[in-house]
């Protein structure tokens, strides 16, 4: 899924030059950060390679409102806040998967600019004037000398604009404009009284989200409006204020159902006008979530990067339901307003969400959320089931109240199964199983390729069921994106295995046997003659002139070398195909040795994957298909290589702390942030934690101590602690493992043991036992 300045982030001024120098030399190990977790976050990470929904500042975790400046407004990739662009083009409230909305811009009106203000309103700015931390963004608009400060609640944007003294103050509502992945159209604004406005706009369709969506909003000011001007050419509005007060406060509540619900969102979430209190409340919410994991040791840069990764794991996917539980349902032929179930206090039992694909989530958010944030995973499962109740199908990437069919397969199956296996979701399991099984059968979501809205052919499911593999190419033609048969076969086989585990749990023996048989289909695309996964055509003939390093040659966003290892449910079986564990280790280790020269990624951005040289890398940690590979060594009985290569990947790929680096690929709404957190605390789940007794593979943590606060509403234990007292950049190998005073012989620990609480002690050294 696709130097000489001071950058003020949180309460800490950070010199990028110093950061880059620090990253190039050893730092002394540091203790538990005295700073709040929020102030450890570096929001500017990787913003030179931004994406419309990537950057966040003035938002709450998973908030409907994701308010921040836009320096680029055209296009999804490179859109939103891009660090290298020095011009602000508005502050918009929705930065979401295939959605954007409500761009505003404070301006001062003069005789020189009044005639062209609707078309010429952009302003230069300097990063030196910025202050950013989770929940807050401030910047000075050089053109107008306006200080703009932004914060929010879940569903309300809160603006504070400080204007020059005696200036003619105004705010431009740029309701009709291209904005990121879609166009805002039909924008209207109505004055309700001297202090309030309301309106709506329509998000245009695109090939990912083919149904329009209306965004409603309610605006409230602390100062009276003097007049409103509408421009006949653009259809946009300029709202004027008096000259006596320098500061204007503005609340902007949004809703996807009605103006009334937008107003109610303000009433429920932001009744006061205390901007500093709203910032503090947001900071507290972020601190409470980020503070569930405390790390000690490593360098200050290590710790700051860790909390930045954790921050990314808790954003991207956004709420679409109102405070009262109303939500947009676009799953049917006609749009409807749905209503979430309410508890005994009249509050929604859960929130409803938009989300990019769960493709690759089995190695990322499935594990992190399932351990540290089970309440978030619980909510998402209920939201996914709400889509099923409305539209008859569990989605894999819903936007605007309907599935976009982004990517391939049934990637939500592992997400939901792991939530059940970990005891997070306990009710209505039979109904959930029926819904999941539907996705794995004909006319289910497996039959759809990426963005295939009207047919069920691009997924090649009928061939997978009949022949045991998805052909490449699909003989009927092109129906969607990512019709790459070898990858589809591998993905479906793993997802079938996860569904089989739930079938077994619920005593559906026949289904268990059926899906376990299908889970072996990965064997049908392994060519022992070349020792790689290899595409087949519909007649079962291997792809001619096969090049395992050619990108997207029957493999989704990867090449054959990377995707050959996509058998997370049966590494033993894969190794047997390769001639045994020793040969598999030798093969994979050689791939890592080669990939090291390119720092384990296909360049520094998702777009760079197509580069003729970068695309031929045998292991790519910049995209999901091979991010599990360093932990495969654990299952091949070479944990020393898991420890060695994971620490190398962290060092070479995921240690940077600057706008120019970060994830070196496609972060995809928390997936790569979550991966980084797991690699750095030394816990991983190869099969996504979907087996009966979910296990964690133990890796080499980056820190001397990791303390995880467990949620008492879901787990018995209070804390799970990992201690590695002799850990260092040299001491990366684990010689002994002890958990609660008992020796651990294997490099695994069960989910139940972890969540019952206790202390895992790792004896580290610079020598491997192997």
Image: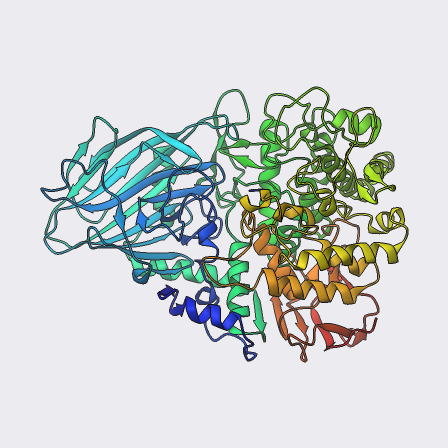
Q: Nearer the viewer, residue 503 or 632?
A: 632
| Residue 216 against residue 307 in the figure, above or below | above
| Residue 485 against residue 698 in the figure, above or below | above
Point out residue 340 in the picture as x, y percentages from the top left corner. 52, 37
Question: Is 173 on the left-hand or right-hand side of 461?
Answer: left
Point out residue 52 in the picture as x, y percentages from the top left corner. 45, 43
Question: Is 325 on the left-hand or right-hand side of 9?
Answer: right
Point out residue 35 in the picture as x, y percentages from the top left corner. 45, 72
> Image point 83% across, 40% down: which residue?
526
Q: Which quadrant of the rendered structure holds the N terminus?
A: top right
Quadrant of res 717:
bottom right
The answer to whether one can see residue 496 in this image is yes
Point out residue 386 in the picture as x, y percentages from the top left corner. 58, 35
Q: Which quadrant of the rendered structure holds the C terminus?
A: bottom right
Question: Is 53 on the left-hand or right-hand side of 302?
Answer: left
Q: Nearer the viewer, residue 754 or 583?
A: 583
Q: Nearer the viewer, residue 252 or 209?
A: 209
The answer to whether one can see residue 739 in this image is no
| Residue 98 against residue 32 in the figure, above or below | above
| Residue 706 against residue 667 in the figure, above or below | below
Q: Nearer the viewer, residue 513 or 84?
A: 84
> Image point 60% across, 38% down: which residue?
384
């Amino acid at each position: 899924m696709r130097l000489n300045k001071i950058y003020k982030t949180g309460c800490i001024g950070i010199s990028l030059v110093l950061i880059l120098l620090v990253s190039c030399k050893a730092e002394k190990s540091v203790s538990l950060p005295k700073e709040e977790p929020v102030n450890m976050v570096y929001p500017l990470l990787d913003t030179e390679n931004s994406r419309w929904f990537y950057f966040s500042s003035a938002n709450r975790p998973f908030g409907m409102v994701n308010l921040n400046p836009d320096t680029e407004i055209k296009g999804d990739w490179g859109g939103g806040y891009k660090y290298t662009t020095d011009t602000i083009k508005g502050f918009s409230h929705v930065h979401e998967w295939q959605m954007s909305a409500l761009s505003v811009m404070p301006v001062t009106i003069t005789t020189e600019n009044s005639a062209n203000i609707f078309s010429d309103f952009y302003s230069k700015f300097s990063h030196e004037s910025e202050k950013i931390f989770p929940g807050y963004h401030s910047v000075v608009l050089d053109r107008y000398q306006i200080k703009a400060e932004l914060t929010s609640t879940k569903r309300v944007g809160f603006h504070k604009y400080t204007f020059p003294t005696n200036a003619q103050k105004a705010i431009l509502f740029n309701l009709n404009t291209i904005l990121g992945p879609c166009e805002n159209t039909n924008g209207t604004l109505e004055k309700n009284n001297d202090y309030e406005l309301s309106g709506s706009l329509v998000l245009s369709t695109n090939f990912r989200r083919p149904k329009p969506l209306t965004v409603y909003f309610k605006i409230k000011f602390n100062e009276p409006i003097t007049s409103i001007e509408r421009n006949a050419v653009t259809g946009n509005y300029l709202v004027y204020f008096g000259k006596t007060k320098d500061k204007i406060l503005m609340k902007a509540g949004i809703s996807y159902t009605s103006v009334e619900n937008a107003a109610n969102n303000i009433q429920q979430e932001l009744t006061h006008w205390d901007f500093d209190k709203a910032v503090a409340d947001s900071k507290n919410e972020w601190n409470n979530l980020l503070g569930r994991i405390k790390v000690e040791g490593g360098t200050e840069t290590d710790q700051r990067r860790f909390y930045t990764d954790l921050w990314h794991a808790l954003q991207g996917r956004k709420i679409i339901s109102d405070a009262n539980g109303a939500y947009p349902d676009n799953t049917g032929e006609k749009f409807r307003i749905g209503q979430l179930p309410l508890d005994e206090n009249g509050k929604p039992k859960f929130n409803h969400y938009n989300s990019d694909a769960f493709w690759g989530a089995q190695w990322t958010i499935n594990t992190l959320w399932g351990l540290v944030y089970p309440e978030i995973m619980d909510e998402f499962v209920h939201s996914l089931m709400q889509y099923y109740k409305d539209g008859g199908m569990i989605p894999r990437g819903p936007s605007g109240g309907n599935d976009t069919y982004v990517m391939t397969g049934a990637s939500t199956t592992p997400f939901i199964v792991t939530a059940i296996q970990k005891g997070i979701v306990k009710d209505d399991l039979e109904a959930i199983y029926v819904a999941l099984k539907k996705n794995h059968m004909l006319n289910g979501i497996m039959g759809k390729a990426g963005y295939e809205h009207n047919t069920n052919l691009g997924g090649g499911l009928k061939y997978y069921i009949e022949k045991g593999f998805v052909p490449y190419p699909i003989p009927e033609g092109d129906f969607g994106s990512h019709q790459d048969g070898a990858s589809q076969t591998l993905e479906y086989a793993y997802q079938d295995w996860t569904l089989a585990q739930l079938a077994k749990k619920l005593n559906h023996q026949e289904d268990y046997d059926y899906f376990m048989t299908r889970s072996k289909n990965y064997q049908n695309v392994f060519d022992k003659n070349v020792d790689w996964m290899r595409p087949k055509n519909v007649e079962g003939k291997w792809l001619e002139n096969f090049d395992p390093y050619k990108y997207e040659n029957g493999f989704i966003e990867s090449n054959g070398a990377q995707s050959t290892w996509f058998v997370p449910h049966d590494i033993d079986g894969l190794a047997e195909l390769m001639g045994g564990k020793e040969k598999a280790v030798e093969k994979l280790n050689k791939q890592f040795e080669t990939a090291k020269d390119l720092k384990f990624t296909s360049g520094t951005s998702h777009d760079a994957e197509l580069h003729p040289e970068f695309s031929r890398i045998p292991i790519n940690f910049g995209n999901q298909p091979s991010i599990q590979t360093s932990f495969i060594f654990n299952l091949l009985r070479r944990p020393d290589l898991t420890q060695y290569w994971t620490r190398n990947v962290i060092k070479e790929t995921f240690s940077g702390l600057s706008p120019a680096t970060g994830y070196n690929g496609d972060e995809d709404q928390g997936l790569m942030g979550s991966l980084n957190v797991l690699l750095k605390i030394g816990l991983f789940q190869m099969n996504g934690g979907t087996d009966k007794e979910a296990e964690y593979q133990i890796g080499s943590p980056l820190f001397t101590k990791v303390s995880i606060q467990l949620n008492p509403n879901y787990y018995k234990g209070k804390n799970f602690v990992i201690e590695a007292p002799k850990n260092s950049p040299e001491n990366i190998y684990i010689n002994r493992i002890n958990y609660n005073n008992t020796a651990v012989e294997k490099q695994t620990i069960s989910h139940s043991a972890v969540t019952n609480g206790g202390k895992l002690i790792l004896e580290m050294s610079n020598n491997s036992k192997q």
